[in-house]
Amino acid sequence: MSERERIAIVTGANRGIGFEVCRHLGRKGLFVLLTARDRSKAERAAEKLRGEGLDVVAHQLDVTSESSVAEMEQFVRSDYGRLDVLVNNAGVALDQPRAIRSFFDAPVVSTLHDTLEPNLFGPVRTCRAFVPMMRERGYGRVVNVSSELGSLTRMADGYPTYRISKTALNALTRIVAAEVKGTGVLVNSASPGWVRTDMGGPDAPRPVEVGADTIVWLATLPDDGPTGGFFQDREPLPW
Ligand SMILES: NC(=O)c1ccc[n+]([C@@H]2O[C@H](COP(=O)([O-])OP(=O)(O)OC[C@H]3O[C@@H](n4cnc5c(N)ncnc54)[C@H](OP(=O)(O)O)[C@@H]3O)[C@@H](O)[C@H]2O)c1
């Protein structure tokens, strides 16, 4: 099957890196289900990419909601019968907005709960919903959008809840990759670097196209591509 017939889901794709990933997957000819937790934001973003001539359809998906993920799974099964690519991009970084500088600051426990919901449990839900579909057909590409802040080798202070969520997401990558090894489903973590988005802020050195590049590369790997890896700029990052 060529890239032109592949179906991809991108989560949290109404803005930022996720939106750019949809654009590049669309340019490669994939059919993209652009998802967002707010239906109207998904519609507006998809409309914009359709205006660029890309094959993009909007769908509501809140990764923190079991019922929303279940509804999306049902929709994909009934309307398309398969999924080829899953990009777990949706995420939050709540440490700075909540004035957390240290792990010992007061709201760390509640903030960690609020962060793990989209950043970890979201991908847990979507992997459980969609990876079995991929395994059944013997083809799949899963990209978990992580961060170098989740690297244990480079672990440091600052952003404690965000770091923990991305380290845990990397563990999920390894676990799912091991479970589906040899089935045609490749599962990897991508670090986009520090990117100019609402999350990254205006001082970030990287434009969204650069942040999206490794994610798109991993989403369209050839069959002999890597699995169970962690990459930035298409190169391995230390776990
Ligand atoms: N920017 C960076 O420097 C950087 C660096 C390393 C890793 N990352 C990672 O890259 C990914 C994208 O980041 P970004 O910079 O593009 O951030 P962003 O501009 O803040 O966009 C985040 C996206 O996630 C969505 N989202 C949040 N919670 C959601 C939920 N429960 N269900 C569905 N969507 C949800 C947001 O939707 P709403 O519009 O509804 O809020 C938004 O579309 C994240 O996983 C982030 O951790 C970013």
Image (cartoon, helix red, strand yellow):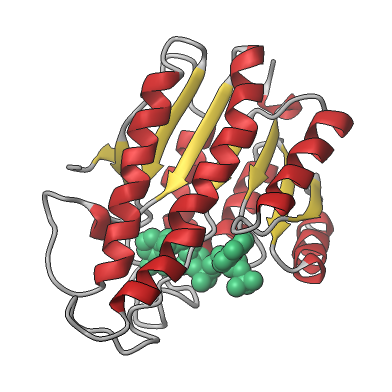
Q: Is residue 181 left or right of residue 1?
A: left
Residue 37, placed above or below residue 212? below
The x, y position of residue 204, in whole percent, is 35, 75
* Res. 155 image quadrant: bottom left
Residue 155, placed above or below residue 2? below
Residue 12, placed above or below residue 103? above
Q: Quadrant of the N terminus?
A: top right
Q: Quadrant of the C terminus?
A: top left
Q: Residue farthest to the bottom?
A: 99
Residue at left offset 69%, top offset 61%: 36
* Res. 132 image quadrant: top right
Can residue 46 be seen in this snapshot?
yes
The x, y position of residue 63, in whole percent, is 61, 55
Residue at left offset 74%, top offset 69%: 38
* Res. 116 image quadrant: bottom left
The x, y position of residue 159, in whole percent, is 26, 73
Residue at left offset 80%, top offset 65%: 39
Residue 26, placed above or below residue 96? above
